[in-house]
Image: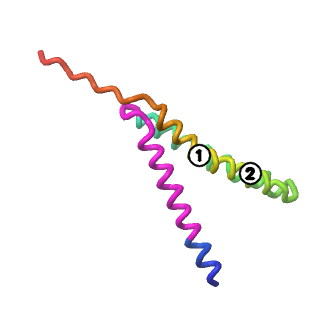
Amino acid sequence: MIVFVVATVLFTLSEMWQSAGSWTLAAELPPPGRRGEYFGAFRMGNSAIEMIGPAALIALAVTTGGWGWFLIGGVFLGAALAAVPLVDWVARHRAAPTPEPTPALT
């Protein structure tokens, strides 16, 4: 019983961490004047993942006799290891915000 409680708590915390991280990326990395465009692309990517992900996981995990789980784990591990350095690189190399032009008084 304790194992299930600990697993539930860890799963819940990891879901909350992932959600907070994805929203932070969507809100803080885009240039200030183009957040809507970036957020729209972010949501479109999430929709594609939600459509393709289940079918891809079933195809790999079920139809391969079980060895596909290793490939799935490798993809998740690679994504996890690449996430922090990639976000750091993007944060360092994004363009400095340009000030908005002030309208001329006529």
Residue type, mark 2 in image: Gly
User: In the picture shown, does residue 79 fall above or below 29?
Assistant: below
Residue farthest to the left? 106
Quadrant housing residue 102: top left
* Residue occupied by mark 1: 83
Residue farthest to the bottom? 1
Residue 66 image point, x, y percent:
84, 59
CA neighbours of label 2 inside 10 A, class few (<14), some (14 to 19), many (20+):
few
Magenta: main secondary structure equals helix
Residue at (54% x, 61% y) in the render: 15
* Residue occupied by mark 2: 74
Residue at (69% x, 47% y) in the render: 78
Residue 55 image point, x, y percent:
73, 51
Residue type, mark 1 in image: Ala
Q: Which region shows up in magenta? A: 10-34
CA neighbours of label 1 inside 10 A, class few (<14), some (14 to 19), many (20+):
few
Quadrant housing residue 27: top left
Q: Give the mark count.
A: 2
Residue 74 image point, x, y percent:
74, 51
**Nearer to the camera, 68 or 83:** 83
**Nearer to the camera, 13 or 58:** 13
Determine contact: label 1, label 2, CB under 8 Å: no
Label located before the other in sequence (1 or 2): 2
Residue 101 image point, x, y percent:
26, 22
**Secondary structure of residue under mark 2:** helix
User: In the picture shown, does residue 74 fall above or below 40?
Assistant: below
What mark, if any, has residue 102 been given in the picture? none
> In the visual, does 73 lie left or right of 27?
right
Quarter in which the C terminus is drawn: top left
Residue at (65% x, 79% y) in the render: 3
